[in-house]
Image (spheres, helix red, strand yellow):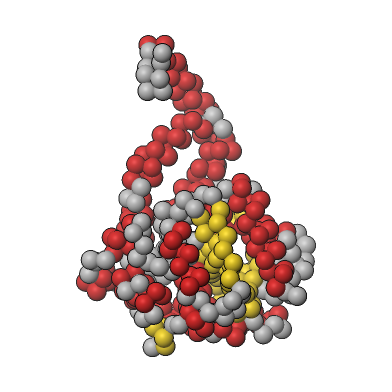
Amino acid sequence: MNGPLNFTPFTLAQEALNMQQKLAAGLRVLPQVEDVHYGATEKQEVWRDGKVVLYRFVGEREPTAKVPLLIAYALVNRPYMVDLQSDRSLVKGLLAQGEDVYIIDWGYPDRSDRYLELGDYINRFIDGAIDHLRQSSGQDAVNLLGICQGGAFSLCYAALHPEKVRNLITMVTPVDFHTADNMLSNWTQEMDVDLFVDTLGNVPADLMNASYLMLKPFRLNLQKYVGLMDILDDTHAVEDFLRMEKWIFDSPDLAGEAFRQFIKQFYQANGFVNGCIRIDDEAVDLGFVDMPVLNIFAEQDHLVPPDASRAMQKLVGTRDYTELSFRGGHIGIYVSSRAQREVPTAIHDWLAKRSR
C-alpha cells in the first residue's frame, strides 16, 4: 500500500508531467500579466504634515457614520495592505457598512527624518490628523483603529489623549512583548540598539524584510515560490501573488531615533506591562485608556502571538473591553476571504452599538 511519502515510477512520472504542463501554461500566462496595481478604493488627501499624509477613502455612497474612523498602520510596511485589491480590502468592507474611513500614510523617511522620535509620530502626526478630523467633522473625538505597531502607537495616543478617542480598535497589536513564543522579541533582547542606530542612522528596509523572512525561513523564502508552480496557469492567481510580493518588498526605511526608542521601550523593557514607556517625557499609563476597546487578533500569528495581544485586557482602564479572535495569520486576518466576510462587519457592529 502506498502511503503519502511513498513514490512509485508511475507517481513520479505523473508529477513530472504535471510540472511540465504547469510550466508550459506559465509560458503562455506570464507574458499576459501586466504590472500589478494596488489600492481598490479612491482616496483624497485631506491633511498633510511633511511626508505624512491623511487620506479619506471615497466609497460608492456617502457614509452614514457621523464619527470618523482613522486607521493607523505600522511604520515597517506600506498601509495599502488594508486596501490591497477589490476582493481583499478591509477598507472597502468598512465603507460598505457606512463607516467614514481615513488612513495615515507615513511616507518614506529619508536622511532628513533620521531624528524623528516616537513623540513625533504620536503627539505630532497622529494628534495632528485627529485634530483635523475633529474640526472637519464637528465631533469632539474620533474612532481610532490601530494595526500592529500602529496599534501600539494608538494605545499610547489613547492613554495620553483619552478625550480625543471615542472608541479604540486594535488589530494584531502587541502589548506583552515578552511572551515565550515571540521569536522577534527574543532576537532583540541582546541587541545593542544604540550601536545599531548610531552606525546605520535610518534602518534599511531590506534589513528589516530579511529579518521578518527569517522568522519562517523555509515557508517565506522557499515554499511559497515552489507553490507558485501550482498557479502558473491561473492569471488571476499569479496577479494576486505578485501584488502581495510587491507589498512585502515595498517597505520604507525606518527613522533611526524612533526605531531606537521603540526597541528599547517596547521590546527590551516590555514597557506596556512594566509601565515604563515615556513619550515626549510623559508617562504612558494604559489605565487612562477608559474608552471602549475592541481588541482583534489572529490565532496563528507568528509576529504577534495571541497571548501578546490578550495581555491588553488586564492593563487598560476601560470596563467596556471586547476581544475577537479570527483564524489566520498576521496578514490573513485582513486579506483572507473569511476575514473579508467577518472583520468589517464585526468592527461596524461593535461601533454601532456604541454610537447610541
Quarter placement of the N terminus: top left
Indicate left or right for 350 with 158 as reference. Answer: right
**Relative height, residue 100 to residue 244 (above, below):** below
Quarter placement of the C terminus: bottom right
| Circle count | 0
Return the residue found at the far top. 10
Query: Residue 115: horizontal and vertical position, in percent?
Result: 35, 79
Query: Residue 342: horizontal and vertical position, in percent?
Result: 65, 53
Return the residue found at the far bottom. 281
* Quarter of image, res 8: top left
Residue located 44% across and 61% down the image: 307
Camera-nearest residue between 204 and 181: 181
Residue located 39% across and 83% down the image: 278
Residue located 34% across and 69% down the image: 267
Residue located 33% across and 62% down the image: 185
Query: Residue 311: horizontal and vertical position, in percent?
Result: 45, 67
Query: Residue 269: horizontal and vertical position, in percent?
Result: 32, 74
Camera-nearest residue between 97 and 314: 314
Residue 203 visible to an observer of this rendering:
yes
* Quarter of image, res 12: top left
* Quarter of image, res 345: bottom right
**Relative height, residue 224 to residue 180 (above, below):** above
Residue 206 visible to an observer of this rendering:
no
